[in-house]
Amino acid sequence: MSEDTFISHLMELRDRLLRTLIAIGAVFVLLFPFANDLYDLLAYPLMRTLPDGAKMIATGVVTPFLIPVKVAAVAAFLAALPYVLYQAWAFVAPGLYAHEKRLVLPLVVASTILFLLGVAFCYFLVFGLVFDFVYKIAPKSISVAPDIENYLNFVLTMFLAFGVTFEVPIVVIILVHMGVVSIEQLKSIRPYYVVGAFVVAAIVTPPDVISQLLLAIPMCLLFELGLVAARFFGKPPAKNEADSRAPGDAEMEREQPVGPGAPDTLLTAKPPENPE
């Protein structure tokens, strides 16, 4: 019986993964004719900071074709992300308790919104400031011509870094809800978290002060936001006293000997009377 259940779970997982791939593939087919436009949109923060007449270059033979296709694939995944998360939710929902279902669905929606907000924050604010800073201090004797493949790798790394960073409140809520840590414990490690945020920002961002600050400061602010949200949404569920007892507790109570110090609530059997 357990083997049949395991196989049925594997088949359901396969079906949901297949639906996810079909959805992403369908969106990709729709976006493929606009692949070049999507790349131009992605490259806009860099292009507007380059000197007049400067353009990006492609060093590979098929790079001018593959890079826009990769951009269209990433855009298709982001567009289909709500459906992807719905399939993940539908797969794990039957195994969750009622209070977990009430928490997980809002967290899935909130995590999607926060990730997209992190990507938007990086695109509209961080890229403009970083590129302005880098190319304004570059020597005038240098001819600036970034490679399109290196630029795409840089953009995806930054998108991932800021998208994951904006998930900090969700992580805090989950940790508090599961009882791994308390809000007081998280407050006590706040100085270490701030130092760790700047270390992480220094590792995952380019070696300039602006991008490091623009990643570390939101990490600290989002940590504080997570502490506030955990007070309302991260409280561990109250356990029912009857359900928390071990199955043999009631039988052990019935087997306790009755003596002078026994509680009055325990029932004792009456000794049989001596017939005369």
Image (tube, grey):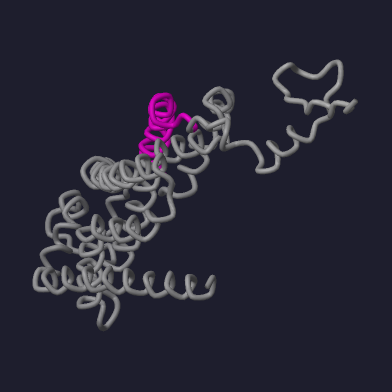
Say above or below: 178 vs 65. above
Residue at 32% over, 73% down = 15
Q: Is residue 176 magenta?
A: no
Q: Would residue 116 be found to the left or right of residue 197 on screen?
A: left
Q: Look at the image and give the residue range highlighted in magenta.
A: 208-236
Residue at 24% over, 40% down = 125
Q: Given the current orientation, which residue lies at the most extreme front position?
A: 276
Residue 153 is situated, as x and y percent measured from the top left of the image, at: 34, 63
Say above or below: 121 vs 92. above
Say above or below: 78 vs 172. below
Say above or below: 256 vs 60. above
Camera-side residue of 169 and 159: 169
The quarter of the rendered structure image containing the C terminus is top right
Residue at 15% over, 50% down = 48
**Is residue 130 among what the camera can see?**
no
Camera-side residue of 163 and 104: 104
Residue 140 is situated, as x and y percent measured from the top left of the image, at: 27, 51
Residue 134 is situated, as x and y percent measured from the top left of the image, at: 31, 46
Residue at 21% over, 69% down = 23
Q: Given the current orientation, which residue lies at the most extreme bottom position?
A: 61
Residue 159 is situated, as x and y percent measured from the top left of the image, at: 32, 52
